[in-house]
Amino acid sequence: MPWLALAVFAGSAYQANQQRKAADSARADAARESTKAAQMAEQQLAVQREQAGIARERLNAEVGKNAEERARLDTQAKKMADDLEAQQREYAEQESQRLKIARRGGRRSLLSDQRLNSELGIGGADNQLGTGLMV
């Protein structure tokens, strides 16, 4: 019987040793998997950071292009506004001239040197009222 107890004890010790080895192996496998998962996560994070940097550069380039385009469009709009203002000014001058001509009835004032002038009186030798001879 002592041999039997010794055999049972030895069998139990052997099974306990095998279970301990299996648990140690499982822990080591879990640690390796955990390390592998952490490395993969770090690699994914590095790739995401790189992609974010590329996206940021593209965004900055787009913002720069948009700013240049906005400046060009602002300049173009200002030029168009200036042209429109000049056209409106020209049209107003033409309309003013048209109204001025319509008020005068199409008549222009005399432009000759011998016109009636309130400061100079009646000018010219042909326009004298009399010859100055007394008969």
Image (cartoon, rainbow, N blue to C red):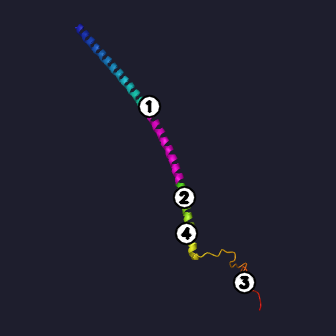
Quadrant of the rendered image containing residue 131: bottom right
Q: Report the front residue among 93 and 52.
A: 93
Q: Amino acid at mark 4?
A: Glu
Q: Amino acid at mark 3?
A: Gln
Q: Main secondary structure of the magenta part?
A: helix
Q: Nearer the viewer, mark 1 or mark 3?
A: 3
Q: Earlier in the sequence, mark 4 or mark 3?
A: 4
| Rendered location of residue 74, percent (x, y) | 52, 52
**Looking at the image, residue 80 lies above or below residue 97:** above
Measured Cα–Cα span from mark 4 to mark 3: 42 Å
Q: Nearer the viewer, mark 2 or mark 3?
A: 3
Q: Residue at x 56, y 64 (%)?
A: 90
Q: Is residue 70 magenta?
A: yes
Do the numbered discs 2 and 3 sit on residues whose CB atoms are within 8 Å? no
Residue extent of the magenta highlight: 47-76
Tag 4 residue: 95
Q: Residues within 10 Å of mark 4 (few under 14, many from 20)?
A: few
Local secondary structure at mark 2: helix
Q: Earlier in the sequence, mark 2 or mark 3?
A: 2
**Looking at the image, residue 59 lies above or below residue 7:** below
Tag 3 residue: 128
In the rendered image, which quarter contains the N terminus? top left
Measured Cα–Cα span from mark 2 to mark 3: 56 Å
Measured Cα–Cα span from mark 2 to mark 1: 55 Å
**Looking at the image, residue 5 lies above or below residue 43:** above
Residue 116, which numbered label?
none
